[in-house]
Amino acid sequence: MAIRITRVYTRSGDRGDTGLVGGQRVPKDSPRIEAYGTIDELNSIVGLARVFNEEKLAEREAHTFLNEVLRQVQEELFDLGAELATPPDFPHGAGFRIGAPEIKTLERIMDECQKELQPLPSFILPGGGRIAAYLHQCRTVCRRAEREILRLSRVEKVDESVIKYVNRLSDLFFVLARWIAARSGEKEYLWERGIKEKTKKKDRDRDRDRER
């Protein structure tokens, strides 16, 4: 379906409300707007990850694979935003809806990537190169989107597939961050419990050695 946008500003939201699919007006800070607004924020960060992936920091195969995955995710996030912008009492018609096939695809991609990764002996600190760092940010914003959608589900009906999809998507971002870091030759930094105390102890030991 072709969409033609000829005007960006409409002035219709100048009083702090906006329109849902079907024309219903709601406050811009309502749970439904917060939910699909966070999905939109997530989509923009996925776009940043794709931009840095275009620098081809990993080998061609990994670069191409990641770009295809992230493009598909962006398309689905846009569809998900439209679904969340549709009130539960408004007929969806022929609009696309997130469901089991999309969730299964995320799981398949994770399983494929995990085969190349070593088990983690500890939690990792977000980072692992520029692409991985943005994917970790995608993960955290995705978790926030999940919380916003759950908050919306307390007051309005939300298809359970939406919550499952967003939950699985945050896992995918974590796996992709680790996978592209490995494919790019970037180092992952493990979280160390009590690192501050360990550092202080090293400093004290070094000072004692100097006094001898």
Image (tube, rainbow, N blue to C red):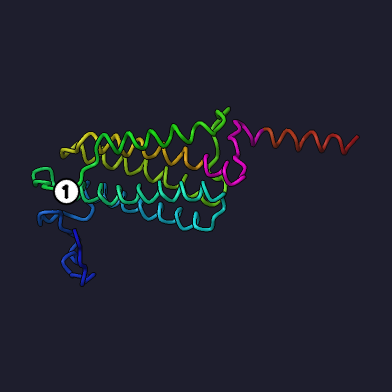
Give SS at disc 1.
Answer: loop
Highlighted magenta segment, given as a residue range: 179-197
Q: How crowded is mark 1: few (under 14 residues within 10 Å), some or many (20 or more)?
A: few
Q: Is residue 6 magenta?
A: no
Q: In which quarter of the image is the N terminus?
A: bottom left
- Residue at 59 percent across and 40 percent down: it is 188
Q: Is residue 196 magenta?
A: yes
In the rendered image, which quarter is residue 17 located in? bottom left
Residue at the spot of label 1: 95
**Left or right for 144, reference 11:** right
- Residue at 70 percent across and 36 percent down: it is 200
**Left or right for 145, reference 135:** left
Relative image position of residue 5 (x, y in whole percent): 21, 68
- Residue at 68 percent across and 33 percent down: it is 198
**Left or right for 177, reference 16:** right
* Residue nearest the viewer, comparing 132 with 24: 132
**Left or right for 101, reference 24:** right
Relative image position of residue 81 (x, y in whole percent): 25, 50
Relative image position of residue 41 (x, y in whole percent): 35, 53
Q: Quadrant of the C terminus?
A: top right
